[in-house]
Amino acid sequence: MDSSTFFGLSTVAYILAMVTYIIYLAFKKESLGIVATALTVAGFVSQTLAFGLRWKEFYDIGQMGILRAVPLTNLYESLIFFVWCLILAYLIIEFKYKNRSFGAFVTPVAGLALAFIDISGMSTNIQPLVPALQSNWLLAHVMMSFIAYAMFAISFSTGLMYLIVRTENRNEPAYIFWTVMLSIFIITLSAMGLDYFTFRVAIQSQEELIKSYLFKASFMSSSSSVAVLSWGIAAAFTFFIWRFGGTLKKIIAGFNISHEMLDEITYKSIAIGFPIFTLGGLIFGAIWADQAWGKYWTWDPKETWSLITWFFYAFYLHSRLMRGWKGKKVAIVAVLGFMAVIFTYLGVNLLLSGLHSYGAQ
Amino acid sequence: MEKEKEKKTITDKVWDLFASVKLAIIIFSLIALTSIVGTIVEQQAEPERNLKLLAKMFGESSAPTIYSVLDSLGFMNMYHSWWFVGLLLLFAANLIICSFDRLPRVLKMVNEKVRPLPPEHLEKMSIKKAVSLKGKASQFRELGVSALNDIGFKPLESSGEQGTQFYAEKGNFTRLGVYITHLSILIILAGAIIGIFFGFNAFLNLPEGETSSVAFQDRGVEVPLGFALRCDNFEVDYYPNSDMPKAYRSWLTVIKNGREVMKKSIVVNDPLVYEGITFYQASYGPVPNAMGNGIFILKLISKNGNSEQVQAKLGDSFAIPGTSVRGKIVDFSPALSIDPSGRAFTYADQLVNPAVAIEFSDSGEKKFSGWLLKRYPKTWDLPDGNRVEFMDYWGVEYTGMQVRKDPGVWIVYLGCFIMAAGLYITFFMSHKRVWVNISEDKNEVKVLIGASANRNRAAFEHKIEKLAGLLSAGPKGGK
Ligand code: HEM
């Protein structure tokens, strides 16, 4: 068996876990919770095996040192590593706080990432390294960036939950914020899923993905009635979440997760993610660029977006120090921070051109 | 108090503004938002490119107007515009003044030593534990010290009416972590500014065999190096059966005052540094119009082991040592491939798969001819058992180097290191204090523990639980 078999298994396990966690939230059956955890652990083990196997496959092909063969060199591999870190962090939290309900918020992030891999038909081939990527700094840079992204993803989930638990009134800005955020998240995931089931093609380049496939089964469909219908459904769905969001609050409240705990996890994961991101994402990235190109900072879009993300989280850390900003406002900053992370990682490659090799893949 | 407020001067107000976290948050947002614009509009690009982009976003008719507005605001080269640099300076000022404003208070906290506290005080601490045990208080004194040692504290002792108290603290300096982090940002900015004023960025395309004592900036401005650099050779290594470069390498010689002072080969990620100027392997390519004029370096090995290295040009002939076999170089291709009908053709103008066609003759009589490929040693063996190794085709490629002088880079690195240390201290260490009060009450020993940590309280609570466990186990040996 090769690595892709195990990756496939883990994807299936995570998606099943996501569904089980959501059912568990709805019905509160302890046995369901155990099944969900077991599925997550199974997925994690399988993914770990896959990662190791791919490392070996890469080593056999690349004919370079074992450290240079870490499979973290393209979008596909880095997304998979991100999911791995995220699930590991989640399992630690589940164990530490003895609370499963976060699973329903974290596994969808993992699911979205893996679904994205599938629908984008991203190249899963092992490619040998171009010279600029043959650097140990790069390895540290990519690995630490993704560990930080995973921490930020956790803070996104708990920040969103915090807002769900803490908002009362449907006309409150924070309530509108989280319902819209959650809707966009679910709608994007579903639209991409739809693209996948409609086209089922392997896409050669990311440019092609954007131009020809992304949202072409729904919002950007060539048939205007499908497109209008999609926008209509999206609006209706958002309205539905907005109208009945209170139910979600009751469900989460039923699991006696206190809002203090959510705030604490949000802060803690950022407090861990921020230093790691600073060192691995910004500093090691700058050192690598300095060694490879002779410039530690060039304001290229990828670097600039990393800096924007960094400022978002600096904003978060400092806004907690301001009078009257505790609570909902900082949770909103945490949620927006993760939007910046997603854009730094995917948006820059897909929408903006960059010097970075991932973009040119 | 009221009166003092009224008396605030303008200077005080400006100081207060710059000392506030609120301004910091506004600046964070401004830098982030304007940077977003800078990543959408292509920086320092041809105007047409951005016009096209704007036309896509806002329509053909309004694009030129929007372009000229953005251009006059400096968005086309925004990271170097006066207002963006101004924003960064404002940010630095905010950081400096904010730190000066708060530092005295923090330093006081750092220097303040932990003192014994009355038991009532301990009962109100965020972490507290009370244990009652049989025995005499004096039996617990040694235990108190060793238990505190066990969890990593060196306690002081004080005795009073309310019993004996051990108290200790750790990590008071960690309160400075935030300031170290902030300082590091200023150091990095300072390093960047030094680099801008006292350094340069340039490039140099140097053909094999040539020497240059200048590099070039945009628009052809020459930068003197203060020494000369020669490219002795340039090579690309490819992955097997693919035209994807695995590594490319230049062999360079530094010449100062007519003497060779340094030799080094560089690859991507491993530059040459001389007198503060760094040469990075950046690109390569064929020298224009030179493809036919290079020098073939061939190693000739005869059947019976004689060998010799020769250099020849297109049209030249050579003899294989110790034999009567001669070869004549008749053709060359920088990238040879064979089409389905078996004919050779050139598929690229870069030297991705160099090949040389040689006609061989023995004692003047034509024997055979064929292509020798540099990347396929199998093609080097001749049918008669002799061998011609195609070592290199020299003098037709240039190496492209990024040339940089940046005396500020070490300051930036220092700043990065300090930032890492500062963040570690800020987020992973804390100022911890612990008090253990031991008193005697009717044959019972009452142990009261109080503790506090400014960060990571949960982890410290575990330690305190361990401490309570050690104390309630009682003195060993039951003295
Ligand atoms: C991007 C640049 C900056 C970074 C990375 C940064 C980083 C940090 C960090 C990590 C903390 C600790 C937060 C926490 O305890 O959770 C902090 C606190 C703080 N920062 Fe910044 N900071 C930056 C810019 C600024 C600026 C411009 C100001 C100017 C007012 C400022 C003022 C403060 C203050 C007053 C604190 C609280 C200190 C305390 O708790 O005693 N920071 N900063």
Image (tube, rainbow, N blue to C red):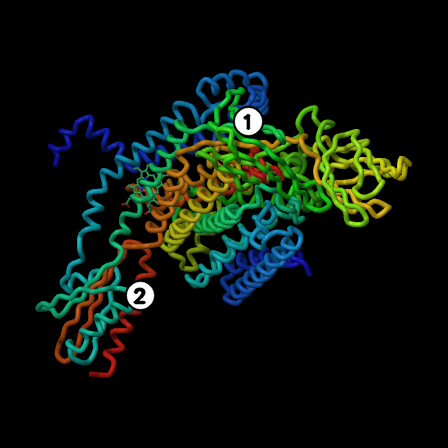
Q: Is residue B351 left or right of residue B325?
A: left
Q: Nearer the viewer, residue A175 or B79?
A: B79
- Does any portion of residue B122 appear in the rendered image? yes
Instruction: Quickly name the residue at label 1.
Output: B212
**What distance separates the C-alpha of mark 2 from that of mark 1?**
66 Å
- Which residue is outermost to the right? B365
Q: Which residue is mark 2?
A: B463
The three-letter amino acid code for the residue at tag 2 is Lys
Q: Residue A231, percent across and down?
A: 59, 36
Residue B371: give x, y in percent of width and height: 81, 38
Q: How many marks?
A: 2
Q: Residues within 10 Å of mark 1 (few under 14, many from 20)?
A: some
Q: Earlier in the sequence, mark 2 or mark 1?
A: 1
Name the foreground residue: B121 vs A35.
B121
Please provide percent x and percent y for residue B414. 37, 42
**Ligand 1 sits in quadrant:** top left
Q: Is residue B237 above or below residue B156?
A: above
**Residue at image x 30%, y 36%?**
B95
- Same chain under badges 2 and 1? The reply is yes
Which label sits in the foreground, 2 or 1? 1
